[in-house]
Amino acid sequence: MNVPHVSALVLALLAYLPAGCDGDGDATTPPDPGNGGGEGVRLERIAAGLDFPLHVASPRGDPRLFIVEKSGRVLVWKDGDILEEPFLDLSGQVSGGSEQGLLSIAFHPDYGSNGRFFVDHTDPGGDTRVVEYRVSADPDRADPASARTVLTVDQPFSNHNGGLVVFGPDGMLYVGLGDGGSGGDPQENGQDRGTLLGSILRIDVDGGDPYGIPPDNPFVGEAGARGEIWAWGLRNPWRFAFDRQTGDLYIADVGQNRFEEVNAVAGAGEGLNYGWDVMEGNACFEPREGCDRSGLTPPAVVYGHDDGCSVTGGHVYRGSAIPSLRGTYFYSDFCSGFVRSFRFAGGAATEERRWPELEPSDGQVSSFGEDSEGELYLATAAGSVYRIVPR
């Protein structure tokens, strides 16, 4: 990686890239601030000193935040502070490579009554595991003995693990998986529907043991295809999100040598092929010239590696504290540290802009999150969690 002008802090953070920059892309200087500023928003730090927070989530109707640390703990932020005891501690059960660890948490839509939640992590062998747990009699502590493995996926390399689990508006669990790693998709998993890698899966955790495959998944019954696949052609969908109002799907897919991309589609994007490794961003990857783009879904936003190196996807703001932001999708780049946004309208990204006032000073943005009310948060590799609030 060519980083002649990057500070020692950034070099240290780059050693823990959660989603890309595999040595085949360059870290670069931040982009020009552009038209950001002046919109009456700011960051409010709610937690600091954490061990590489990677995800922030809340159950429906719950005022608490649950913060996932890369090293294996899930912390509870309650009444303005982090509780001393973790909600769940898997520190001895996760691998610690640069793109490995405890990667996300998803609460069942009926968590308030059934206490079920799911985590995605890489095990000591580096393979992906999606595991179900239940809360204990103490609402601030999980029951570690309730663990039930839902899904295990072999990972041929240590990087491109995806790692997000999220319940969609339909109540199904969506699981993001990268192409298996290394660089350039050497196993050609991105365009292979016979593997779960390089895809977003849609599974029914209420309809089978360990899960059911929804009969309306796009490739159910198709020879040579895995029925769990919902969308495919992805390199490393580190973070994706559903708009909680419209159900539209946003996927931030980390690029290879040249481009980062954010995909946005009306609805949930059933059966769509996002193009990797035929395409990287909006350009041909294999072959470099004259690739066949038929049947591929182009990204809504693309930026080059003169602007960043590892896209961090976010959420569409649907909170009430800042009405002017409703319908705005926010995202970042782990290397450059910018925070940008757009609105998805008429099948295209509109009102694109940068927000310097939302760019944290203490580290790269590793993930975004939202609480039960739709307010937005961002986490940094340096150990902080911030809330976006009115100025």
Image (spheres, rainbow, N blue to C red):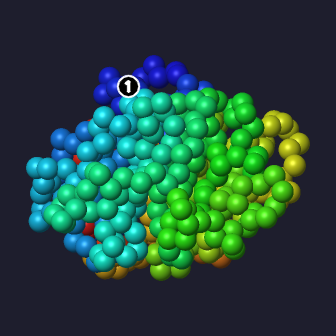
User: Left or right of 49: which side holds 28?
Assistant: right
Neighbour tally class for label 1: few under 14, some 14-19, many 20 plus, Cα within 10 Å:
some
Q: Position of residue 226 (x, y in %)?
A: 72, 55
Q: Is residue 4 above or below residue 38?
A: above
Number of dots carrying numbers: 1
Q: Position of residue 161 (x, y in %)?
A: 53, 41
Residue under the image location 58 percent in, 30 percent down:
157
342 sits left or right of 143 in the view = right
* Nearer to the camera, 313 or 117: 117
Secondary structure of the residue carrying tag 1 is helix
Instruction: Work out which quarter of the rendered image holds the C terminus and state it.
Output: bottom left
Query: Is residue 48 at least partly visible in the picture?
Result: yes
Q: Badge 1 is on which residue?
A: 11
User: Residue at left 57%, top 43%?
Assistant: 153
Q: Nearer the viewer, residue 120 or 267?
A: 120
- Residue in the image at 81% along x and 61% along y: 222
Q: Quadrant of residue 388?
A: bottom left
Where is residue 23? Give x, y as percent.
55, 25
The residue shown at (40%, 74%) is: 109
Q: Amino acid at mark 1?
A: Leu
Residue 370 seen from this side:
no
List x then y, in percent, for residue 92. Answer: 31, 34
